[in-house]
Amino acid sequence: MTVKAILESKGHGVFTLGPNEKLSEAIRMLAEHRIGALVITNGDRKIVGILSERDIVRVVAREGAAALDIAVRSAMTPKVKICNENHTVNEVMEIMTRGRFRHLPVEKGGMLDGIVSIGDVVKRRIEDVEREAEEIKQYIATA
């Protein structure tokens, strides 16, 4: 299973925000859409950062309520790990585990093409394991 297959199933939609927007707007979007991260783009779908709930918690712990008025660029993670549609589920799981994050933007041609979450990856891995188990059962039953 590849990232391409995940995106074909779930879609390529990604919630994005510009780096100059206020953190309060990012928080509103995360809550409204019930998501854990926003990809920060410069307007032409070029990835410049990612902002997760963890990033927000760190800034609020440091700045208090004043954090709501700071620019997203001050809270985001600027060095974003990415993947492409040819990465396998296992490769994506390894990247996420090693980096200790739960969202991985997908890039195609230097531009944002989608996002995969740890939930997407785990769901696909479970489906693969269940399919393999069923195939083994069928093989045993017909042998």
Image (cartoon, rainbow, N blue to C red):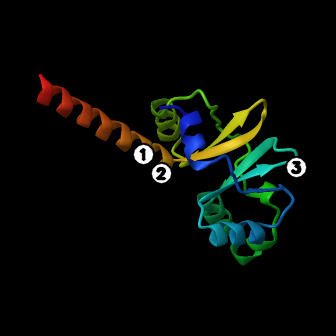
State the image coordinates of residue 141 (x, y, percent, origin top left): 12, 30
| Residue lying at the far front of the rendered structure | 142
Marks 3 and 2, Cα distance to the nearest angstrom?
Answer: 27 Å
As rendered, which of 70 and 143 lies closer to the eye?
143
Residues marked 2 and 1 touching at CB (< 8 Å):
yes
Q: Secondary structure at mark 3?
A: loop
Q: Amino acid at mark 2?
A: Gly
For the C terminus, the quadrant is top left
State the image coordinates of residue 137 (x, y, percent, origin top left): 18, 33
Marks 2 and 1, Cα distance to the nearest angstrom?
Answer: 5 Å
Q: Amino acid at mark 1?
A: Val
Residue identified by numbered label 3: 43
Crowding at mark 2 (Cα within 10 Å: few <14, some 14-19, many 20+): few
As rendered, which of 49 and 17 lies closer to the eye?
17
Work out whether mark 3 precedes mark 2 in sequence or the reverse, and give the earlier one. 3
Seen in the image, is 1 located left or right of residue 29?
Answer: left
Crowding at mark 3 (Cα within 10 Å: few <14, some 14-19, many 20+): few
As rendered, which of 59 and 126 lies closer to the eye?
126
Q: Which mark is residue 114?
A: none
Residue identified by numbered label 2: 119
Crowding at mark 1 (Cα within 10 Å: few <14, some 14-19, many 20+): some
| Residue lying at the far bottom of the rendered structure | 65
Which residue is found at the position 65% from the left and 66% from the top?
30
Q: Secondary structure at mark 2?
A: helix
As rendered, which of 48 and 84 lies closer to the eye?
84
- Decide: is 1 above or below 6: above
Marks 3 and 1, Cα distance to the nearest angstrom?
Answer: 31 Å
State the image coordinates of residue 3 (x, y, percent, origin top left): 56, 35
Which residue is found at the position 71% from the left and 57% from the top?
15
Residue identified by numbered label 1: 122
- Decide: is 78 above or below 1: below
Q: Secondary structure at mark 1?
A: helix
